[in-house]
Image (tube, rainbow, N blue to C red):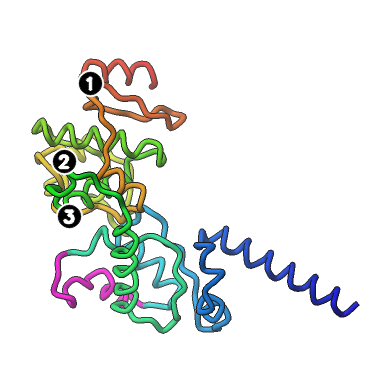
Amino acid sequence: MKLRYIATLFVLSFGTLLGMMYHYRLDFSLLADLSFYQSLANPDARIVQVREGLRKEEIADLVGSKLGWGDSEKSQFINAHLALNTDDLEGKYFPKTYILLKDENPLGVTSIMLHQFSTQTSAIKKPKTAKIINPETALTIASIIQREAGGKNDMKLISGIIWNRLFNGMKLQIDATLQYAKGSEEDGWWSKVYPKDKSINSLYNTYLHVGLPPTPIANPGLAAIDAAYNPQKTNCLFYLHDKKGNIHCSATYEGHLKNIDKYY
């Protein structure tokens, strides 16, 4: 009877663990890592789920809410590049589920996330032509893909369209970059774009400026980064998503207008 009780308790506990891992999208290979169980058992540990496509201010709020940060700590996290004497780190706060100690400081969290970025992205298969692609350029494109795509299936097509526009010397004219330019804590980080926003005086306004914005606009996941390096071959220059989230593209602006009439 006692053995049956222990077995039942084990099954329930293990089931709960698996459910938690599925909910937080944790890597199941962690089940073989003793430190993983030690972290879960630590009363000072906090699980923080960082989704793809957030900007660093959103991540600061998310992590800060779990670790009890105030405005000062959040500001240190957002401006970690200044303390580290490096370029802006937007795009390199790798999205995944972390187990962090509640007293971890902003620079410590930054270091953990940068390490994950380096580790995870090193596994991406890059074509031979990728040798001529600046990694920062690829990361900026990946961040746009992450915000623009309706799902992973769209990413390589959108990448191909972005690269086509760049190679053709066209303005990208992408709404997600406008959202980054106008985003704020008060009005929302990814608020709706209106026609008047296309005149915003910002280097992130790709309706005014040719080429890419000066930094990534979000923190992309592996699929978006992979898509930036491995775009789908296409002659399309324009795209839209219909009301069901399906993507439609066209090689000409006239074709794009027809798609607008057809799907909207």
Q: Position of residue 159 (x, y in %)?
A: 26, 38
Q: Position of residue 233 (x, y in %)?
A: 25, 30
Q: Is 48 displayed left or right of 115 in the figure?
A: right
Q: Is 176 displayed left or right of 12 in the figure?
A: left
| Residue that protrudes farthest toward the front in the picture | 128
Which is nearer the eye, 46 or 73?
46
Query: Helix or strand or loop: what does disc 2 sit on?
Result: loop
Q: Residue at x 38, y 60 (%)?
A: 95
Query: Helix or strand or loop: what does disc 1 sit on?
Result: loop
The amino acid type, in three-letter code, at marker 2 is: Thr
Numbered badge on residue 202: none
Numbered badge on residue 136: 3
The amino acid type, in three-letter code, at marker 1 is: Ala
Q: Which residue is mark 2?
A: 206
Q: Residues within 10 Å of mark 2 (few under 14, many from 20)?
A: many
Q: Earlier in the sequence, mark 2 or mark 1?
A: 2
Q: Is 165 displayed left or right of 106 in the figure?
A: left
Q: Would you identify the image quadrant in which residue 231 lies?
A: top left
* Placement of 87 over or under 134, stated as above or below: below
Q: Position of residue 124 (x, y in %)?
A: 31, 52
Numbered badge on residue 251: 1
Q: Main secondary structure of the magenta part?
A: helix
